[in-house]
Amino acid sequence: MTLLRAEGLQRSFGGVQAVAGVSFEVAAGELFALIGPNGAGKSTCFNLINGQLRPDAGRVLLDGRDITGLPPRRIWRLGVGRTFQITATFGSLTVLENVQAALLSRQRRLFGLWRSVAAEDPAPALALLARVGMAEQAHRPCGVLAYGDLKRVELAIALANAPRLLLMDEPTAGMAPAERLSLMALTARIARESGIAVLFTEHDMDVVFRHADRILVLDRGRPLAEGRPEEVRADPRVRAVYLGEEG
Amino acid sequence: MIGNLLAQALSGLASAASLFLVAAGLTVIFGVTRIVNFAHGSLYMLGAYLAYTIVTALPRGPLSFWGGILAAALAVGLIGVLIEVLLLRRIYRAPELFQLLATFGVVLIVQDAALAIWGPQDLLGPRAPGLRGGIEILGSRFPLYDLVLIGIGATVLLLLWLLFHRTRFGILVRAATLDREMVGALGVNQRMLFTGVFFLGAALAGLAGALQLPRESVNLQMDLAIIVEAFVVVVIGGLGSLPGAALAALLIGQMQAFGILIFPKITLVVVFLVMAVVLVLRPYGLLGRPPPPHAAAHAPPAPPLAPLSPTGRRLGWLALGLAMLLPALLGEHALFVLTELAVAILFAATLHFIMGPGGMASFGHAAYFGIGAYAAALLIKHLAAPMEAGLLLAPFAAGLAGLAFGAFCVRLSGVYAAMLTLAFAQIAWSAAFQWVEFTGGDNGILGVWPSAWAADKRLYAWMTLLLCLGGALLLRHAVFAPLGLALRAQRDSPLRAEAIGINTFAVRWVAFSLAAALAGLAGVLLAFSKGSVFPTYLAIPRSVDALLMVLLGGVQTSLGPFLGAIAYTGLHEQLMRLTELWRAALGAVIIALVLFFPGGLAGIRLRRP
């Protein structure tokens, strides 16, 4: 069943056509990787889907609903969680408060003035933190956490809205190799348990080939190949753009 | 007729030329060092005083006149270097507002130094030799000296252009304005660059001040008068943009020259109207551009806020209880001071709410204080309403003003947002000052007394204490409520906040308006205690007072506004009693605080783990 559908996305910056006609579909519960060499248009493509950028042409459909050009906060309300290439958390708030902010936002209670946040039941937020292995650090401010831990907090925040789709922009960038695989293993496990689709871009081929169900390879803004990991790995065109082999 | 218009345009050009000289230095300094130099107007004033001393000491003649002007400019440049090396160099990494506070300390010290050296009376300098008269242009007389001023403005613009495009120093300055980090990474000696830029900027301010000698008397109010206009020019042009400053100076000069002809009533407000319109349409000024993205990312995260520990909470309630006992024990004057202090605490708390948890700066917070006070006073004056109606209307009116002005201000960030708040505050101030039939103008509104039941000073002090501390505690509570959480969240990471469905604009807007409403309450409580309102309720010094209290107390602590208001009010009273030079003493205390306790008074406690 198709959850996310991108149709003929195009976007240019000045004279550069960053994304030149990209279409793909992500099914519910599927881990879908968007890869390609530097400048292939991965990040632009990603930002067209999450609402950060507006496409020049094409549409983005979530569960059949057109979400093209909606602001990020509206897309979030439709059940799309995000993590960023460079982590974005609230540095002065504790890990717990970071997740509570997302939960309160989900309940549309963020304009409350009377009941203090400390009086809220921490159980739902702690449960989310337990899923990503961060419950012990719940009371530390995010500003002092190690980078790998921040990535986990971001994942917990993204899960707070019970999303149908996770958008992860280079989820393992800036992490040590061992941590990368464990973070993606965690993501994959959570996605499968809860039937969440994950669309991610990634530079680390190890991570991609181990965890993605399907892969779309972009080159200079255009789709080059699409398929299961073993198909993509065997594709001579992919080898050419990645390894510089003469096809 | 045409001659008249031409004369008006030329006189606009002459003021544009002086404005440009001041603004050019300010914008170049900001572009490279990112310092918002409040003391720039003081350098301008020093230029005028030094030129007076030098020119009157020398024998009369064109050589000594122009030599004196140049010598004054160079001397001010050296004073600028002194300020940079002794003070600013130590605080380049401090938050923007602390730098502003430190330079404000310099303003206070220079004011008292000038008072001590040159005395309180206005000084009339000599006319420029050979340029006393005027010339006929199409039937209108025009002062010759103003023509020379226009020529000097154009020459300096040309020289600066050559400096910035034809010399290594100039190219480095332009590069540093675009991306300071990158210039540092390329191995440029930043210390020399910064000092050089400060010398240049200060000398330009000194030159502008010195050139005023034949045009107007030298006085102690020159510094603040020019700094506000210079900021307006710099912000309209785009911070750091020299061509922008030139363009904006031309625009403002002409608007002032012709504004007087068309709407004599709105002369004071016209520059701020222009700034408001420009900032609403172009958030980074006419020729400015958004700051490089990593400039903001380098700011360290704010320290976490936590509610008080049980002991702290008990101490807090104890302090509150003692405060509530105070009116029973005090005499009449002390009661009045207590009322003022309570008002200061609430006013500081409202500014702190938007600056600390909200991360927005405001240079015009007095607007809401004054609008609250004026709303009640006008109600009493025109409709003979009782105090209770005024007390209810004030926060409502100030809150509405907060909604209206805030809708524009909270879209911007940093210095631009702060300047737009200043613009709105000045517009409100001009309405109070110039709309004499309705607001009483400079004479204010008298007879704003409490109802009979609250006429007793002691009772009124109790009511004020209750409402002010209640309001301040409400805001403190709000910081820990969901709204406060959202407010701190959008300050820490707007990107993340939007990604979890938070409407960051709405959160900032609501917080801004709430703070405005309570500032209005503070204002009306002071009005009824004094029995009058004056335009000073809305004026810049009151905004600056609040800013000083918040920064003294510590922006990023929830106790800051309480400590800051008490310390500032106390310091002010004590210093005024102890020494004639209380301004300089206050300035020195402020600078010492910035240098040694950058976290504010409440931060002193936080330093020890």
Image (spheres, coloured by chain):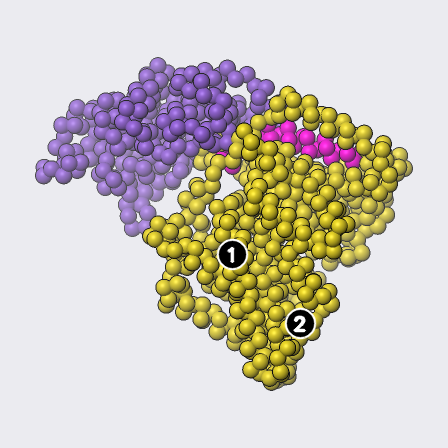
Chain colours: A purple, B yellow
Residue A208 picture quarter: top left
Picture coordinates of residue B428, whole percent (x, y): 68, 51
- The quarter of the image holding the C terminus of chain B is top right
Residue drawn at x 31%, y 45% as measured from the top left? A12
Q: What amino acid is at disc 2?
A: Glu
Please determine whether, in this image, residue B268 is positioned above or below residue A181: below
Please determine whether, in this image, residue B503 is positioned above or below residue B141: above
Residue B368 picture quarter: top right
B527 displayed left or right of A245: right
Q: Which secondary structure is most common in the magenta stretch?
A: helix
Residue closer to the observer: B485 or A147: A147
**Quick one: label 1 or label 2, which is nearer the N terminus?**
1
Q: CA distance from mark 1 to mark 2?
A: 29 Å
Q: What's drawn in magenta, residue-wise?
A: B463-492
Residue drawn at x 67%, y 69% as measured from the top left? B218
- Residue A1 in the magenta stretch? The answer is no
Residue most toward the left?
A: A246
Q: Nearer the viewer, mark 1 or mark 2?
A: 1
Residue closer to the observer: B343 or B483: B343
**Crowd rating for badge 1 (residues with CA inside 10 Å; few <14, some 14–19, many 20+):** many
Residue drawn at x 63%, y 59% as measured from the top left? B110
Name the chain letter of the residue that bears numbered label 2: B
Q: Is residue B446 visible?
A: yes
Residue named by callout 1: B84
Which SS class for mark 2?
loop
Q: What amino acid is at disc 1?
A: Glu
- Residue B484 in the magenta stretch? The answer is yes
Residue named by callout 2: B216
Residue most toward the right?
A: B452
Which SS class for mark 1?
helix
Residue closer to the observer: B2 or B530: B530
